[in-house]
Image (cartoon, grey):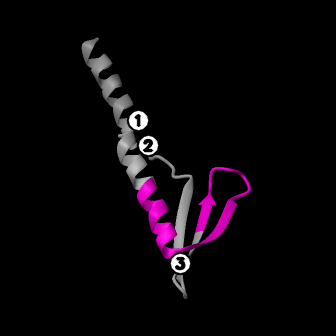
Amino acid sequence: MKKYTLILLLLLTVNIFSQEKKKCITVEEERLPNYKVKVIKTNHCVEPKEITVAVYIVTEWEKKKRKKRKTRKNDK
């Protein structure tokens, strides 16, 4: 009985770890002339894909990325 329980537990843990997390939002950045960055955010989790396009100055975009990285580090 112990062996069956152990095998069942092992199979469940392997199943859980093998499942991949799906990333919902992808961010693509494209450099434009005159120190600008075009940012395209695509949300794949909603049925009609949400595509958001924004244009930032390079320094402003770097500042946003730094802030996001900092909050992500603090969450862990």
Residue with the mark numbered 3: 30
> Which quadrant of the figure has residue 55?
bottom right
Q: What residue type is labelled 2?
A: Gln
Residue 53 pos. (x, y %): 65, 69
Of the residues under marks 2 and 3, which one precedes in the sequence? 2
Residue 43 pos. (x, y %): 62, 56
- The structure residue drawn at horizontal position 45% and vertical position 61%, both measured from the top left corner, is 65
Q: Does the magenta stretch include residue 63?
A: yes
Looking at the picture, does residue 63 appear above or below residue 4?
below
- Kind of element beneath mark 3: strand
Total count of labels: 3
Residue with the mark numbered 1: 16
- The structure residue drawn at horizontal position 51% and vertical position 83%, both measured from the top left corner, is 35
Q: Which amino acid does label 3 sit on?
A: Glu
Q: What residue type is labelled 1?
A: Ile
User: 16 or 34, which lies in front?
Assistant: 34
Q: Does the magenta stretch include residue 50?
A: yes
In three-dimensional space, the C-alpha distance between marks 2 and 1, rounded to whole angstroms, equals 6 Å
Q: How crowded is mark 1: few (under 14 residues within 10 Å), some or many (20 or more)?
A: few
Of the residues under marks 1 and 3, which one precedes in the sequence? 1
Q: Residue furthest right?
A: 48
In the rendered structure, find residue 19 and report the number of the disc placed on it.
2
Q: Residues within 10 Å of mark 2 (few under 14, many from 20)?
A: few
Looking at the picture, does residue 19 appear above or below residue 40?
above
Between disc 2 and disc 3, the foreground one is 3
Q: Give the range drawn in magenta.
A: 40-67
Q: Are marks 2 and 3 in contact (CB under 8 Å)?
A: no
In three-dimensional space, the C-alpha distance between marks 1 and 3, rounded to whole angstroms, equals 36 Å
